[in-house]
Image (cartoon, grey):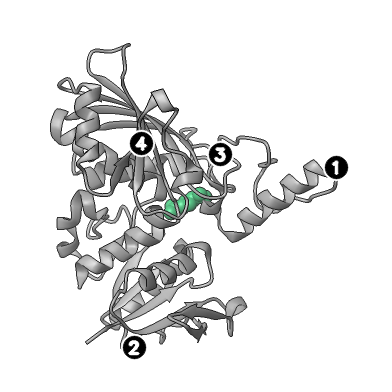
Amino acid sequence: MGVNVAVVGATGAVGKEMIKILEERNFPVDELRLLASKQSLGKKVRYQGKDITVKELTNDSFSGIDIGLFSAGGDISKKFAPAAVNANAVVIDNTSAFRMVNDVPLVVPEVNSDAIKDHKGIIANPNCSTIQMVIALKPLHDEGVIRRVVVSTYQAVSGAGLKAIDELKKESKSILENGEYKRTIFPHQIAFNVLPQIPQSDAFLDNGYTSEEMKMINETTKIMGCDSIKVTVTTVRVPVVRGHSESVNIETETKITAEKAKELLTNFPGITVIDDPSKELYPLASFAAGKDDTFVGRIREDESIENGLNIWIVSDNLRKGAALNAVQIAEKLI
Ligand code: L14
């Protein structure tokens, strides 16, 4: 007997990737129900050689559904996840709507899959930048107990959706050709530029941090199950289509040598170490795009403190950062 799966936000950047990953991993789907807003009605999405027509998302969309994969924005999740749970579906929510709610497990399977069993109908998928960071922090924390993490991110535009990818491409072209382009997504020029602001609107909180930065701080402690890890973050948008990069400085209670860190990271599931300075080999967004693993390199000791490491982490934000992690949670569920 297969599983009936609904994808909410089926025509978005993450929704499309979810459908692709269900197919690639031979997830035992019985019925695949594709749901989206009115604008996407009637669109067709290909799955296992067949076209599936997208239906309108309503409170009645979930009868018979076992698992609902939500990725249509926080407001949609808040509005429709309860209907899915009432219909006895388990919701795996990719938005920030429920991540910090007490009863809602926030899960990266390689790090805290035990949390899944405590769900009461909703399981939250963490923020893309959080996922790829905690997967690398976990083996280092287990070895040397992390005190503090200082991270700067270099985030791809696809996190902001298909329209943001389009904006980067069109703006780049217009600059190269001295043409005109009118921005509609980013607050400033993103082509050939770097923006220390994510997301693109209502980003800044009273403490001067962005919501993306606070998500990484709060979600990391929840997933790692450890309040004593201090985290500080600067999140930055770069003109890359796919793949987030992160520069991460880690201070531990006990010394972890660079060599030991490399061994721990190499042996951890979901991580591939690419770290050969003599050959100029290190993780790149262009390499990570379309792949499943989280790639770690530039592993070296922070010589300015006693017990510190610097690492560089890259992963595909639409796959491990979103769709793949959600499907991996669904695999653990069934
Ligand atoms: O919280 O704009 O899941 O790149 C992930 C994508 C927040 C915004 C989340 C972006 C979103 C982010």
Q: Give the alpha-carbon distance from disc 4 to disc 2, as whole Å.
A: 46 Å
Q: Which residue is mark 2?
A: 63
- Specify the amino acid type for callout 2: Ser
Asked if the residues shown at circle 3 and circle 2 are in contact, with their CB atoms under 8 angstroms apart, the answer is no
In the rendered image, residue 210, in percent from the top left (x then y), is placed at: 49, 39
Residue depth check, mark 4 versus mark 3: number of the one nearer the observer = 4
Image point (56%, 39%), residue name: 197
Quadrant of the rendered image containing residue 297: top left
Q: Amino acid at mark 3?
A: Gln
Q: Nearer the viewer, mark 1 or mark 4?
A: 4
Cβ of disc 2 within 8 Å of ligand 1? no
Residue at 52% across / 78% down in the picture?
A: 45
Foreground tag (1 vs 2): 1
| Residue 211 visible from this viewpoint | no
**Figure quadrant of residue 147:** top left
Residue 274: mark in rendering: 4
Report crowding for label 1: few under 14, some 14 to 19, many 20 or more residues within 10 A (C-alpha): few
Q: In the image shown, does 68 or 299 lie closer to the viewer?
A: 299
Is disc 4 in contact with disc 3, using a CB cutoff of under 8 Å?
A: no
3D distance between C-alphas at marks 1 and 4: 39 Å
> What SS does tag 3 mark?
loop
Q: Is residue 56 visible?
A: yes
Percent position (x, y) of residue 247? 41, 31
Residue visible at 32% across and 11% down?
304
Q: Which residue is mark 1?
A: 178
Question: Mark 1 is on which residue type?
Answer: Asn
Distance, label 1 to label 2, CA atoms, is 53 Å
The local secondary structure at tag 2 comes to loop
Mark 3 and mark 2 lie on one chain; the one further toward the N terminus is: 2
Q: To which residue does mark 3 refer?
A: 197
Sequence-first disc among 4 and 2? 2
